[in-house]
Amino acid sequence: MEIEAFIKAPAKLNLHLRVLNRRKDGYHEINSIMVPVSLYDFIYVRTLSEEGIEIISESDNIPKGEDNLLWTAADRFFKCSGIRGGVSVKIVKNIPVAAGLGGGSSDAARLLVLLNSIFKDVLSFKALYNIAKEIGADVPFFLRCKGSIARGIGDILEEIPHIPSFWYVLVCPPVRVSTKWAYENIKLELTGYENSNNITFQDIDDFSISEILRNDLEEVVSERYPVVREIEDLLMETKPEGVLMSGSGPSVFGIYEDLDNAKEAKDMMISHQVGDVFLVKEI
């Protein structure tokens, strides 16, 4: 019997991203604060009686085969669970691609969650986590989608219990940034990484957003893509709590406590036509 199901895959923002040492395997150790926000891709799944994985998208920019993380997630789920069968996955993309928002990683993780639900939790959370970690460094974050401190390569997660709520005006310019390129070109000697692995939020009653905003990838990305600085300067005119590039960019966000102020900032950024503009909130 075929089963149809649906799940939303949220974007994430990095409120803090420090890049530490480069490991022998090529990955970088990081120290980051990530929050999921209300910008979603939509994933529609239909199980198949025959074996095979089908990826469907109306976008020509989305790969339909093995180089799509959705395909990888489905393939590894079936292999790990021992379930014989197949799946058709339709993806509706709303999260910009290669924008520092984790869209592909979120899609993969949420598909794992959905498949496991369809097949009656055949895999433990630990098994899902191990699959997610194999797919990509930040994929495990999207299994639970909770504001978290991320360490290691982004796979060691400590949930933040009471992160304050803000509105974010997110601006995504029409350029793509390779995460691999950004990390390969960062100047580690300038990040001061030796003493940076110390972010903890056991008690964040006095949480101040301005104290944690940092992105060690921002300098190298903005040097190559000046539009990042242009967007940051424009957002600063709207008097936000802070402004930062997310992840490996080029997406930039402004932070607002008041919804009306955030709406005004969104309208202003739309008028400047520097990219796609979204008003989002933590979920």
Image (cartoon, rainbow, N blue to C red):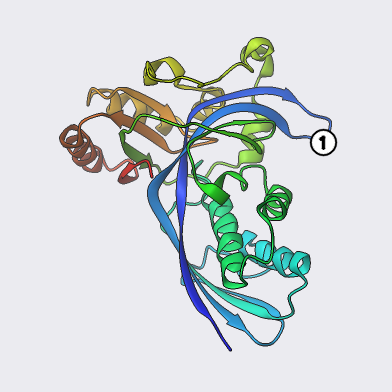
**Nearer to the camera, 194 or 47:** 47
**Nearer to the camera, 255 or 82:** 82
Please name the amino acid that badge 1 sits on. Answer: Asp
Q: Position of residue 23 (x, y in %)?
A: 79, 29
**Residue drawn at the location 38% of the way across and 21% of the way down:** 209
**Residue drawn at the location 62% of the way across and 84% of the way down:** 48
Report if residue 67 is visible in the image.
Answer: no
Question: Which quadrant is home to the N terminus?
Answer: bottom right
Q: Position of residue 137 (x, y in %)?
A: 67, 42
Q: Position of residue 131 (x, y in %)?
A: 72, 54
Q: On the image, which quarter does residue 52 sit in?
A: bottom right
- Residue assigned mark 1: 25
Up-down relation of residue 179 to residue 120 (above or below): above
Relative to 126, is 178 on the left or the right? left
Q: On the image, which quarter does residue 169 sit in?
A: top left
Question: Which quadrant is home to the C terminus?
Answer: top left
Relative to 60, is 123 on the left or the right? right
**Nearer to the camera, 124 or 93:** 124
**Residue drawn at the location 67% of the way across and 79% of the way down:** 86
Q: On the image, which quarter does residue 191 sit in?
A: top right
Tag 1 secondary structure: loop
Q: How many marks?
A: 1
**Nearer to the camera, 107 or 156:** 156
Up-down relation of residue 234 to residue 98 (above or below): above
Density class for disc 1 (Cα within 10 Å; few <14, some 14-19, many ≥20) is few
